[in-house]
Amino acid sequence: VNAVKTIHEWDRLVVCPRYGFADIDTYYRECSVGPRLHAMELPTLIAVAEADPMVPRVTLEPWIQKTSEHVEVRCFEQGGHVAFPRSIAAGESLEDDIIAWLVSH
């Protein structure tokens, strides 16, 4: 585990065995939200970043183009899974923007 350098390696070496997935493809197929975005019925907000270190926008692009009418996608150049800089927010922070979105829905 100490030699892991990518999320893919981490998922393959740690997540799959720990949670009983046969392999990395099975894990991604069963747990990825992308293929389910077209069927969302509840209001859903997705914040994605071009350079997200775990889920880059490019990996979601095919699914983003097929979202249901209940899905709102906000794309950012900076930030991602670990954090989003305050400079991208309409309000005080992206967290505040998300709370405002939740309250409005």
Image: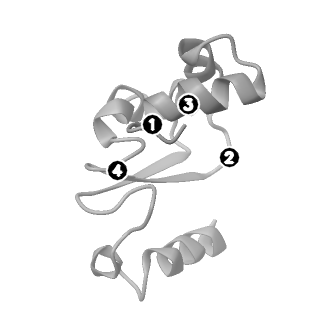
Q: Are marks 2 and 3 in contact (CB under 8 Å)?
A: no
- Tell me which amino acid carries mark 4: Asp
Left or right: where does residue 31 sit relative to residue 71? right
Q: Could you say which disc has been placed on residue 4 in the image?
A: 1
Q: Which residue was labeled with disc 3?
A: 11
- Circle number at residue 52: 4
Comparing 86 with 15, the one in front is 15
Residue beneath the point at 68% across and 46% down = 42
Residue farthest to the left?
77
Q: Amino acid at mark 2?
A: Leu
Q: Is residue 77 above or below residue 59?
A: below
Q: Residue at x 58, y 26 (%)?
A: 13
Q: Which numbered tag is attached to residue 42?
A: 2
Q: Position of residue 23 (x, y in %)?
A: 60, 12
Q: Nearer the viewer, mark 4 or mark 2?
A: 4
Answer few, some or many: residues within 10 Å of disc 4's Cα (few below 14, many 20 plus, some between 14 and 19).
some
Residue placed furthest toward the front: 2
User: Which kind of residue does numbered mark 1 sit on?
Assistant: Val
